[in-house]
């Protein structure tokens, strides 16, 4: 399932180090040819571009004014109500993909801070 969820630019682990998927890496991941890729768990460290609302226990990105991430349940929240999802947002690439769908822009995460 992981390989079917990713796209160019998503951040994943390659041999234990975070990398952005380029064409070569994406093809290797999809073909599973000597690929050592894994999803990056979504942690507070990766949410540096978001603001934390201690009252609501949610992370918000300025571009998603009505959307937030509940880190405890790993669910997307819309205007304080939970959105039913087929899978929780547990990994960095899932958050990136949700952000792109909702804004049409890439979610810029500071990969260089984690190298």
Image (spheres, rainbow, N blue to C red):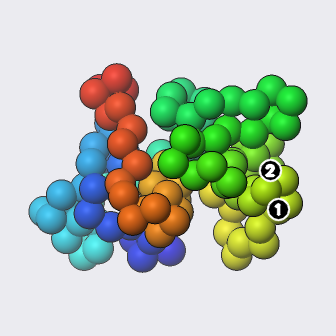
* Residue depth check, mark 2 versus mark 1: number of the one nearer the observer: 1
Q: Secondary structure at mark 2?
A: loop
CB atoms of marks 2 and 1 within 8 Å? yes
Q: Of residues 4 and 31, which is closer to you in this image?
A: 4
The spot of residue 1 in percent (x, y) is: 50, 74
* Residue 88: quadrant of the picture: bottom right
Residue 38 at x, y = what percent? Answer: 42, 53
With 74 as the anchor, is 62 left or right in this view? left
Q: In this orientation, which residue lies closer to the viewer: 26 or 97?
A: 97
Q: Residue furthest top?
A: 113
Residue 72, image x, y percentages? 80, 42
Find disc 2 in the rendering and name its residue: 73
Quadrant that contains the C terminus: top left
Mark 2–mark 1 Cα distance, whole angstroms, equals 10 Å
Image quarter of residue 47: top right
Residue 115 visible, this orientation: yes
On the image, the x and y values in percent for residue 108 come to 36, 42
Residue drawn at (68%, 54%) of the image: 66
* Tally of numbered discs: 2
Mark 1 neighbour density, 10 Å: few (under 14) some (14–19) many (20 or more): some
Numbered badge on residue 50: none
**Which residue lies under the disc numbered 1?**
82
Asked if 82 appears above or below 12 in the picture, the reply is below
Residue occupying the point 35% across, 54% down: 106
Mark 1 residue element: strand
Task: Compare marks 2 and 1 and give the one earlier in the sequence.
Answer: 2
Name the residue furthest left.
24
Is residue 15 something that shows in the picture? no
Q: Residue at x 75, y 59 (%)?
A: 78
Nearer to us in this view, 69 or 43: 69
């Amino acid at each position: 399932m992981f390989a079917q969820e990713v796209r160019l630019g998503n951040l994943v682990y390659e041999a234990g180090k975070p990398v952005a998927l380029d064409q070569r890496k994406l093809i290797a991941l999809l073909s599973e040819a000597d690929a050592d890729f894994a999803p990056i768990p979504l942690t507070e460290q990766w949410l540096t571009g978001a603001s934390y609302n201690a009252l609501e226990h949610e992370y918000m990105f300025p571009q998603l004014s009505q959307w937030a991430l509940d880190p405890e349940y790993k669910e997307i929240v819309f205007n304080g109500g939970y959105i039913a999802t087929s899978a929780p947002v547990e990994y960095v690439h899932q958050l990136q993909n949700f952000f792109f769908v909702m804004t049409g822009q890439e979610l810029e995460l500071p990969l260089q801070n984690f190298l």
